[in-house]
Image (cartoon, rainbow, N blue to C red):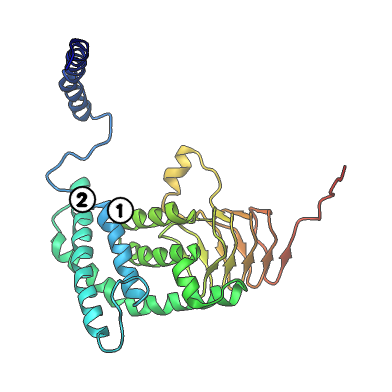
């Protein structure tokens, strides 16, 4: 190595050392910020539920709910029992573990008396798994609704593999069942994973009836206290939301109805906004695109904007 390159290396090493020597001070400042109590962290012997494992639970549930679609193995009548047995056993272990962590975290956060977290986690996981056949039936209705409602759908397989609306609904139905058992954190992590993947935001607390179809889906928002009946179809950009609230109202209405009710057989076209806990869209109504609603619509009603005037130059 010539002298000039050797000198450059020495300077580079010295410079790197100077910067690295600042790291312990940065670490000290970070530790102080954790001890100050002004920031958010989880410094505890008890771990939180794992976001990565919760995402794994979604995919494991999909392999059980849709046998043969999302597994690498070939499945037939000969090995179906073996396949589902393996999947169900592994699913129980990971689900009960994460539910236990969520329960334990809530107990410690609220200084609650011990409620046998591990036993409770296994109990809820078992009850959830007992609902899997019913969830399969519900999702089969959602798939048929998509096929009947979208002429671009060439097969059920295409819908299961590729429709973002079905993926979001699948995750919602999984998360909602856990939400019903008062499991904290996990349902919202699931729903926000689906939101991130599809652009469809369905709160796990919403109540959605059978044969639900979201066409296209990007930008759909369905709030926590929304009630949706049977055979409802909505398109992209639909918001079923709450009216804007002050800070005091947020606390007062945290456990109250804030989102609309959509009755059976309603169609809601793209870009519609429906707000408020007292707003009801009556059965069999059709809500035209880009309309705004804060009051109820009677059953069997069609609502459309007046045709705008187009100007050509």
Specify few, some or many for label 1: CA neighbours under 10 Å numbering under 14, 14-19, or 20 or more.
Answer: many
Say what secondary structure mark 2 lies in: helix
The one nearer the camera, 78 or 130, is 78
Q: State the SS at label 1.
A: loop
Q: Nearer the viewer, residue 248 or 164?
A: 164
> Can residue 294 be spotted in the picture?
yes
Label 2: which residue? 105
**Residue 185: which disc?**
1
> Residue 5: horizontal and vertical position, in percent?
21, 15
Identify the residue at the far right of this view.
Answer: 313
Q: Seen in the image, is 71 located left or right of residue 2?
A: right
Residue 101, quarter of picture: bottom left
**Percent position (x, y) of residue 75?**
30, 81
Q: CA distance from mark 2 to mark 1?
A: 10 Å
Check whether the beta carbons of the residues at disc 2 and disc 1 lie within 8 A of each other.
yes
Above or below, 167 relative to 133: above
Name the quadrant of the N terminus.
Answer: top left
Please tell me which residue lies in front, 41 or 117.
41
Question: Mark on residue 133?
Answer: none
Where in the figure is residue 124, as x and y percent of width and height?
A: 24, 68
Residue at coordinates 67% horizontally, 69% vertically from top-left? 285
* Residue projecting furthest to the bottom: 78
**Few, some or many residues within 10 Å of mark 2 (<14, 14–19, 20+):** many
Name the N-terminal-most of marks 2 and 1: 2
């Amino acid at each position: 190595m010539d002298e000039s390159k050797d000198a450059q290396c020495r300077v580079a090493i010295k410079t790197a050392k100077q910067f690295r020597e600042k790291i312990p001070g940065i670490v000290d400042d970070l530790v102080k910020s954790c001890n100050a109590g002004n920031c958010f962290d989880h410094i505890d012997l008890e771990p939180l539920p794992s976001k990565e494992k919760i995402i794994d639970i979604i995919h494991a549930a999909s392999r059980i709910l849709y046998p043969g679609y999302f597994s690498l193995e070939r499945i037939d009548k000969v090995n179906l029992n073996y396949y589902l047995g393996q999947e169900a056993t592994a699913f129980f272990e990971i689900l009960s573990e994460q539910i236990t962590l969520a329960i334990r975290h809530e107990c410690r956060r609220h200084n609650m008396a011990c409620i046998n977290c591990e036993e409770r986690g296994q109990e809820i996981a078992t009850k959830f798994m007992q609902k899997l056949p019913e969830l399969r039936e519900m999702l089969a209705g959602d798939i048929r609704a998509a096929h009947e409602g979208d002429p671009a759908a060439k097969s059920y397989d295409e819908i299961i593999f590729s429709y973002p609306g079905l993926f979001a609904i699948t995750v919602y139905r999984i998360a909602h069942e856990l939400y019903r058992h008062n499991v904290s954190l996990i349902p919202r992590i699931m729903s926000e994973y689906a939101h991130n993947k599809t652009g469809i935001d369905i709160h796990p607390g919403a109540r959605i009836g059978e044969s639900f179809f979201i066409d296209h889906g990007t930008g759909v928002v369905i709030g926590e206290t929304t009630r949706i009946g049977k055979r409802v179809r909505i398109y992209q950009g639909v918001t079923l939301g709450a009216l804007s609230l002050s800070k005091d109202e947020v606390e007062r209405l945290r456990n109250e109805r804030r989102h609309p009710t959509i009755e059976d057989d309603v169609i809601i076209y793209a870009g519609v906004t429906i707000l408020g806990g007292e707003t009801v869209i009556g059965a069999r109504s059709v809500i035209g695109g880009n309309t705004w609603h804060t009051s109820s619509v009677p059953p069997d009603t069609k609502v459309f904007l007046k045709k705008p005037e187009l100007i050509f130059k």
